[in-house]
Amino acid sequence: MAVAMTSTVEVLIVDDQAPFRMVARTLVRRLDGWQVVGEAASGEEAVEAAAATRPGLVLMDINLPGISGIEATRRILAAAPETQVILLSTYADDDLPPDARTCGAKAYVRKDALTLALLRELQPA
């Protein structure tokens, strides 16, 4: 017997570029059962917003003013290990900073590869 999914995927979008936040917000809103619970434009704002909203998923830019997205990811996961973070950037995989692979993020996605299908695939359990 199939069980209907009743929980909502609550998403925090973190990027210092408003146009990218708008694109990400549009993608998330197109997914049934997903909702944007907050946005942030810096690493510090991301940590504060994650503490306030307790999202299930954070879409996190790596390059942010203030603390990096990598450091913000560490802090968010230290406070809420159940949160899943997807790092985003324009870096090629080979050019990622080494600590991007060890900060606890679930995955790294190039910004130009962020699609509805990929978000569904990365959906928190």
Image (spheres, rainbow, N blue to C red):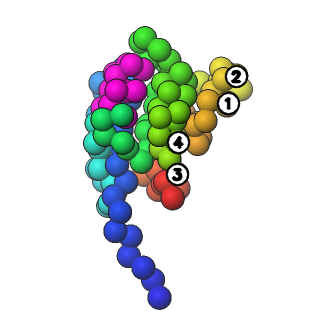
- Give, as a three-letter code, the residue at label 1: Thr
- Asked whether disc 1 touches disc 2, contact meaning CB atoms under 8 Å apart, the reply is yes
Residue bearing mark 4: 81
Q: Is residue 64 visible?
A: yes
First in sequence: mark 4 or mark 2? 4
Spatial CA span between label 4 and label 3: 17 Å
Give 86 or 112, whichever is nearer the viewer. Answer: 86
Spatial CA span between label 4 and label 1: 14 Å
Spatial CA span between label 4 and label 2: 21 Å
**Start-end of magenta stretch:** 39-50
Taking the image as shown, residue 96 lies to the left or right of residue 78, namely right
Taking the image as shown, residue 86 lies to the left or right of residue 17, namely right
Q: Residues within 10 Å of mark 3 (few under 14, many from 20)?
A: some
Residue bearing mark 1: 102
Residue bearing mark 3: 122
Spatial CA span between label 2 and label 3: 22 Å
**Residue at the location (38% across, 76% down)?**
4
